[in-house]
Amino acid sequence: MPYRPEHKQQTRDRSIECARQLFNRRGFTEVSIDEIMSAAGLTRGGFYNHFKTKEDLYVETLEAFACRNPTEGWDDVTVDFSVRGPELARQMVNGYVSRQHLEDVEGHCPLIALPSDAARAGSTVRAAYQKLLAAMAEIFEAKARPRNGVTARQQGLSIASTCVGAMVLARTIDDSTLANEICDAARVFTFDITGWADEDGNSVDLAHYS
């Protein structure tokens, strides 16, 4: 009996999610197609019913990540996309450089998990990585408050670079105290260059996010 269309979509979605988690955990180059399909409960032959190459699957994992809110599974960290302006930007920064994000290896933003792999990969993978970075920077740019000669575009790129860079470093080192300091420093620096204090002008409670 032939499978229904929704079964094919579910199979595809399961493959993408398993690939995303494995890529985050071990890197793009170290994960094989066989491993991905085994984790999804499928055979290697089924891979080619949905994707042409592993690079194409990687592109799909980035697009899937861009459409989800990873903070839904984290305690005490929320990003509410129904809010607007600096409040959303604050929530995004706080969530991105939070301890919860750092410890959620399988749920990591791919920008954190795969920078070296993406740099060594082909043009398809690098283009997908760049697209996700550009989307992140554009969100911050839209919430920016140009000041001191720094444009909204420059702010957006700086914030994205600061957040991603801080998390890459924090993920790499074993000293949890230093890792927390790096994340806190990224948050403080970001709020300083943007003027994103809370609505009353107060500083952010760093301990709440560490």
Image: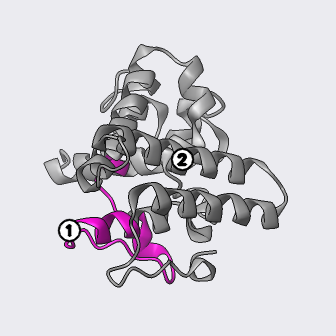
Position above or below: 143 against 126: below
Residue drawn at x 46%, y 42% is: 158
Q: Give the amino acid type for the residue marked by disc 1 in the picture.
A: Arg
Q: Label 2 sits on what residue type? A: Thr
Asked if the magenta segment contains residue 9, the reply would be no
Name the residue beneath numbered marker 2: 162
Residue 11 in sight here: no
Q: Which residue is more in the foreground, 118 or 48?
A: 118
Give the magenta range: 64-90
- Residue 176 figure quarter: bottom right
Identify whether 176 is placed above or below 143: below
Establish if 83 lies above or below 113.
Answer: below
Instruction: Name the residue that disc number 1 marks.
Output: 84
* Pointer 1 or 2: first along the chain: 1
Q: Quadrant of residue 30?
A: top right
Label 1 packing within 10 angstroms: few (<14), some (14-19), many (20+): few
Q: How is the image coloured?
A: one colour
In the image, taking residue 140 as reference, residue 177 lies left or right, namely: right
